[in-house]
Amino acid sequence: MVDIIIIAVVFVLLLFALRSSVRHFKGEKTCCSGGSREVREKRLDGPVLGSFKVRISGMHCENCAKRVKGNIDKIDGAVADVDWQSGLANVRYDRTIDESVLRDSIQILGYKVESISVGK
C-alpha cells in the first residue's frame, strides 16, 4: 500500500514538472530574470537605411528574446525582431548605429553576440 502511495506522489510531481517545462519553453513562465511581460512595438521615425543580422547565443526561451528585443529597441533609431530558436536578431535602423553599441546592449543581459553582419 505504501508503494502505491509513493508511486502516485511521484507521478503527480512528474506531471507538474512536465507542465511547468512546457510553459517555460513556450515563454509563458518566468525565466531568465523576467516574466510574461508585453514588449511595445517600436516604430522607426524615418525610412529604413539598413539592417544587421545578429547571431546570439544563450537565449533559451521567448522571454529571453523579449529581453533582447527590449534592450535593442532602447537604442535610438533601431528596432529588432528576435527569434530565440534560431538565435538571430534582425535589427533595422533609420540612422547610423555603431555595432559596439548594439553588441553591448545584448551582452549586458548576459547573452553572447557570435556575429554581426550587414543584412539584406
Image (cartoon, rainbow, N blue to C red):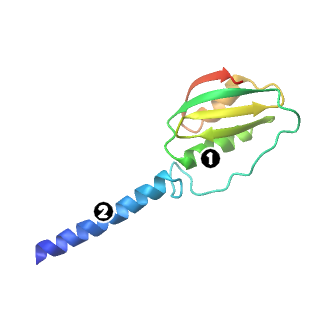
Q: Quadrant of the N terminus?
A: bottom left
Q: Which residue is drawn at 53% across and 58% down?
A: 28
Q: Which residue in the structure is indicated by mark 1? A: 66
Marks 2 and 1, the one that precedes in the sequence: 2
Q: Are marks 2 and 1 in contact (CB under 8 Å)?
A: no
The residue lying furthest to the front in this view is 120
Q: Residue at x 82, y 26 (%)?
A: 49
The kind of secondary structure element at disc 2 is helix
- Residue 12's place in the image compared with 50, above or below, is below
Q: Residues within 10 Å of mark 1 (few under 14, many from 20)?
A: many
Q: Residue 37 versus residue 87: which sits nearer the camera?
A: 87
The kind of secondary structure element at disc 1 is helix
The residue lying furthest to the right in this view is 46
Q: Which residue in the structure is indicated by mark 2? A: 14
| Left or right, residue 10 beside residue 118 | left
The image quarter in which residue 106 lies: top right
The amino acid type found where label 2 is placed reads Leu
Percent across and percent down for residue 22 are 44, 56
Q: Quadrant of the C terminus?
A: top right
Percent across and percent down for residue 54 are 62, 28
The image quarter in which residue 75 lies: top right
Q: Which residue is drawn at 56% across and 53% down?
A: 34
The amino acid type found where label 1 is placed reads Lys
Percent across and percent down for residue 5 are 18, 75
Percent across and percent down for residue 37 are 63, 56
Q: Residues within 10 Å of mark 2 (few under 14, many from 20)?
A: few
Q: Distance between the residues labelled 2 and 1?
A: 29 Å
Q: Residue 96 versus residue 28: which sits nearer the camera?
A: 28
Q: How many marks?
A: 2
Mark drawn on residue 81: none
- Residue 85's place in the image compared with 13, above or below, is above
